Amino acid sequence: MAVERLRISTLHFLQDTHRNLMQATNENPVLIDRYGRKVDYIRLSITDRCDFRCVYCMAEDMTFLPRDEVLSLEECARLVKTFISLGVGKVRITGGEPLVRKNALWLFEEIGQLAGLRELVVTTNGSQLEQQAAALKKAGVRRINISLDSLDQERFRKITRVGDLQKVLRGIAAAKQAGFESIKLNTVLMRGFNDDEALPLLNFAIEQGIDIAYIEEMPLGAVDHTRDSTYVSNEATLKLLQQHHPLVSSAETTGGPARYWRVPNTNTKVGFISPHSHNFCESCNRVRITCKGELYLCLGQEDKVDLMPLLRDHPDDDRPLIEAILASMQIKPKGHDFDLRRAEPAVVRFMSVTGG
Ligand code: SAM
């Protein structure tokens, strides 16, 4: 009883605070956490399924969720609309592999025309882009991230366990043809797997006139290797690339944690997302929603709120959903806590579950 009273009074306090804030600033509503960080970016995973099984991302034998435990596309659209009404401007659709979800395009089209949306972006492994790139662009997707960890057919197969490099390269070509504002390759370098490909992958990006970001491998979920055995620091990658290209540091940002460098006389910028060597949590502006409707406040922590019951129990009333989202700002953690020397992962969820 006392706990319930406390919960209700906390909620009222939060609602008052939020109302006051809106009145005080006379602006659109905003999500601000207890550290004063403004959350204006959501990453929504629309499926936990993927047609690849990347060794750093998933186990070989994955059990995927039954369909009725996954948000419907209509529920996804309702969630996005609600977040946008709370001041979120940037939406990334991810997964699993978002483009293997049946009718995913419908969702992109729904979101693409929402008033208040600043930017709709997608992260994909590229396997479906040959068929879908043009339609995604038409739906309003402005930028696209395509994961690519190797340019060698056999090695690509070894890392993804099942992927076909040629299909992804055709997907990249289709994305270029579709004319997105920017295309960025996402590369996870792993010692003993592909750490000798940092330079060939950058040269490929330059040749294609697109960007590339190197992401340090994160200890999310239990995989077949220990994470510290494969860790490659972005600092080492930067040093290596600088021996071949006169990279120029840039203050550019795409609203995420990457730090960028320009390759002079090319159209390519090189990003480094360095959760280990450069902690970026102080400027974290995002939350993630899994395909089950779990709102995770941090990629590397367990704090979450289940939104699915609020969607399903209140099909015609967004208020409980809005209250829960507002209240979640009070449990957004200060930051992740990755320690590669620990034998266990920082969190048991694979990146494919939380949504990369
Ligand atoms: N299937 C899509 C794809 O391949 O891009 C979207 C989902 S995937 C989980 C999103 C991104 O997360 C990919 O760029 C992938 O390389 C990255 N990723 C997955 N597991 C990771 C890990 N443990 N550490 C760092 N990046 C990871």
Image (spheres, grey):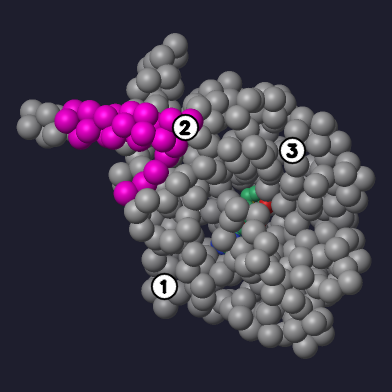
Q: Which mark is residue 66?
A: none
Q: Is residue 349 left or right of residue 104?
A: left
Where is residue 38 shown, x and y percent of the image?
45, 47
Residue kind at label 2, given as amino acid type:
Glu
Res. 61 visible in picture: no
- How far is disc 2 from disc 1 in space, using C-alphas? 40 Å
**Residue shown at 43%/61% (left/top)?**
282
Residue kind at label 3, given as amino acid type:
Val
Determine whether the beta carbon of the residue marked 2 sits less than 8 angstroms from the nearest atom of ligand 1.
no
User: For the N terminus, which image quadrant?
Assistant: top left
Residue bearing mark 3: 141
Q: Which residues are magenta?
A: 8-34
In this rendering, the answer to whether 139 lies above or below 347 is: above
Q: Ligand 1, what quadrant?
A: bottom right
Callout 2 touching callout 1 (CB < 8 Å):
no
Question: For this rendering, which residue is in front, 91 or 307?
Answer: 91
In the displayed image of the protein, which residue is found farthest to the left?
2
Regarding mark 1 in the picture, which secondary structure is present there? Answer: loop
**Residue shown at 67%/62% (left/top)?**
252
Q: Which mark is residue 27?
A: 2
- How far is disc 3 from disc 2 in space, using C-alphas? 26 Å
Magenta-span inclusion, residue 9: yes
* Main secondary structure type of the part rendered in magenta: helix
Regarding mark 2 in the picture, which secondary structure is present there? Answer: loop
**Residue shown at 41%/47% (left/top)?**
297
Residue bearing mark 1: 339
Determine whether the beta carbon of the residue marked 3 sits less than 8 angstroms from the nearest atom of ligand 1.
no
Q: Earlier in the sequence, mark 3 or mark 2?
A: 2
Q: Is residue 81 left or right of residue 98?
A: left
Residue kind at label 1, given as amino acid type:
Asp
Quadrant location of residue 72? top right
